[in-house]
Image (cartoon, rainbow, N blue to C red):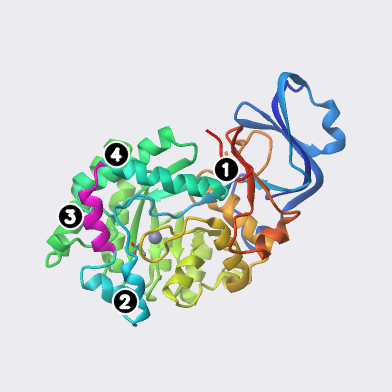
């Protein structure tokens, strides 16, 4: 017999969720359970029951059980954003005009702009300033339906400031409602002081940063920007293998700007995910499919760099589970709304709304090792869900450029109501 529940979301017009505890590839990516006239019952921070409204009277309640009316709207799992550069000092709005004049992303970086200008501002910021700025960004994410996000370091690029960044992520995870999953990304760029001796910087990453990060348990993943003029394939392999020796699972920024071979490298080192993949080759995609690497695609970055879009359909056809993320960062994709990403994935990747939902929930959770507890509306999973100002799944894929979130339940508590944060 079910124990009394604390919160019941009733009058759900359509409940849409993927099912399961692992990533979904191929045809399965588009298989989403839809229940018309549904309810979700929550006990503590977990889902206790999901079903059709006609079964609701059988649910045991107590005096304090709260009934929340979803108003006939769509309910989905809370969105999971599996690729963000959440913690940074300053912004880079001036680069937009440079880009409009035709200066490329890699040229801006080469002249000390881009990532390197963010490094200057991040080093100058205190831990408290980074935490405050991160909290503001997380509030925006929560208001737009994101209940869990991955966060990468990579704008410190020395031992002290990389640790400061990861400590900011840890503090935010303790204090903010949105759950954070930390990734160490010391290999995001070669800082100016190591410009002429990149090998020495790679040694610093391998011999000082990674051991400290692992010792202080500040990250779960180790990511490398494997890119022309940043870290070569051999250097990336070296850094990823060093991380693995310290228990940090590999992730790769792969084939974002040039087809360098990052997708194949991700397969070779057994990375959990390869991310970006705008220029991934047929061989890279085949290698990922064979090795079971999850693709994290970032259409906001393609839009913002005004470049081509990753071949999502080919990846899905080859059985690769596709996840979607914002890539939130101050340069190549300054947005932290997954809703824009949902729309772009439909229009530019030709993914159907059901595939997109799986990509921003279950597959996203799997790409950061959280799919056992997150990413679907099923008994025993964390009670993270979104009530949308929308009648069905098609609507949120179609109506773009505005925030359609009405209510967010995070860990069983109403965190956003009527589109506003609840204190
Ligand atoms: O700050 O430009 N691609 N890293 C790799 C980024 C983009 C973030 C940035
Ligand atoms: Zn990135």
Residue at left 47%, top 55%?
336
**Along the polypeptide, which appears first: circle 3 or circle 1?**
3
Residue at left 59%, top 48%?
22
Q: CA distance from mark 3 to mark 4?
A: 29 Å
Q: Nearer the viewer, residue 246 or 66?
A: 66
The secondary element bearing badge 4 is classed as helix
Q: Does the magenta run of residues contain 119?
A: yes
Q: CA distance from mark 2 to mark 3?
A: 34 Å
Q: Which stretch appears magenta? A: 115-126
Quadrant in which residue 164 is drawn: top left
Dominant secondary-structure state across the stretch colored magenta: helix
Quadrant in which residue 348 is drawn: bottom right
Q: CA distance from mark 2 to mark 4?
A: 31 Å
Residue 63 at x, y = what percent? 73, 17
Q: Please say if the residues under marks 2 and 1 sit with CB atoms less than 8 Å apart.
A: no
Q: Is residue 75 visible?
A: yes
Q: Which residue is mark 1?
A: 420
Q: Nearer the viewer, residue 363 or 83?
A: 83
Mark 1 closeness class: few <14, some 14–19, many ≥20 residues within 10 Å: some
Q: CA distance from mark 3 to mark 1?
A: 47 Å
Q: Which residue is mark 2?
A: 98
Q: Does the magenta run of residues contain 167?
A: no
Q: Which residue is mark 4?
A: 128
In this view, the mark in front (2 or 1): 1
Please indicate whether residue 219 sits to the left or right of residue 6 in the image: left
Mark 2 closeness class: few <14, some 14–19, many ≥20 residues within 10 Å: few
């Amino acid at each position: 017999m079910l124990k009394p529940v604390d919160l019941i979301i009733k009058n759900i017009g359509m409940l849409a969720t993927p099912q399961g505890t692992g990533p979904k590839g191929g045809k399965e990516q588009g298989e989403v359970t839809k229940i018309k006239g549904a309810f979700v019952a929550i006990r503590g921070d977990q889902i206790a029951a999901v079903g059709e409204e006609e079964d609701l009277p059988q649910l045991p309640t107590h005096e304090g059980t709260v009934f929340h009316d979803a108003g006939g709207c769509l309910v989905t799992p809370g969105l999971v954003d599996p690729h963000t550069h959440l913690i940074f000092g300053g912004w880079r709005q001036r680069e937009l005009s440079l880009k409009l004049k035709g200066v490329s992303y890699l040229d801006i970086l080469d002249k000390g702009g881009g990532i390197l200008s963010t490094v200057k501002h991040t080093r100058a910021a205190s831990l408290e300033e980074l935490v405050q700025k991160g909290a503001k960004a997380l509030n925006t994410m929560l208001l737009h339906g994101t209940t869990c996000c991955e966060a990468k370091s990579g704008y410190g690029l020395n031992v002290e400031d990389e640790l400061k960044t990861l400590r900011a992520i840890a503090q935010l995870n303790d204090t903010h409602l949105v759950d954070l999953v930390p990734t160490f990304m010391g290999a995001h760029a070669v800082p100016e002081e190591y410009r002429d001796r990149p090998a020495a910087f790679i040694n610093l990453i391998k011999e000082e940063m990674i051991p400290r990060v692992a010792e202080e348990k500040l990250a779960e993943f180790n990511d490398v920007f494997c890119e022309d003029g940043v870290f070569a394939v051999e250097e990336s392999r070296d850094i990823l293998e060093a991380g693995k020796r310290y228990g940090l699972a590999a992730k790769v920024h792969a084939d974002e700007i040039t087809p360098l071979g990052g997708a194949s490298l991700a397969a070779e080192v057994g990375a959990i995910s390869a991310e970006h993949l705008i220029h991934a080759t047929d061989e890279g995609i085949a290698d990922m499919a064979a090795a079971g690497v999850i693709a994290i695609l970032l259409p906001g970055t393609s839009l913002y760099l005004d470049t081509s879009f990753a071949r999502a359909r080919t990846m899905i056809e080859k059985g690769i589970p596709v996840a979607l993320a914002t890539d939130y960062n101050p340069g190549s994709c300054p947005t932290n709304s997954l809703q824009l990403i949902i729309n772009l994935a439909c229009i530019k990747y030709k993914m159907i709304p059901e595939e997109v939902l799986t990509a921003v929930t279950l597959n996203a959770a799997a790409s950061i090792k959280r799919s056992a507890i997150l990413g679907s509306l099923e008994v025993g999973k964390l009670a993270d869900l979104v009530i949308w100002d929308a009648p069905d799944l098609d609507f949120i894929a179609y109506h773009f450029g505005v925030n359609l979130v009405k209510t967010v339940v995070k860990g069983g508590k109403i965190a956003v109501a009527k589109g506003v944060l609840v204190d």
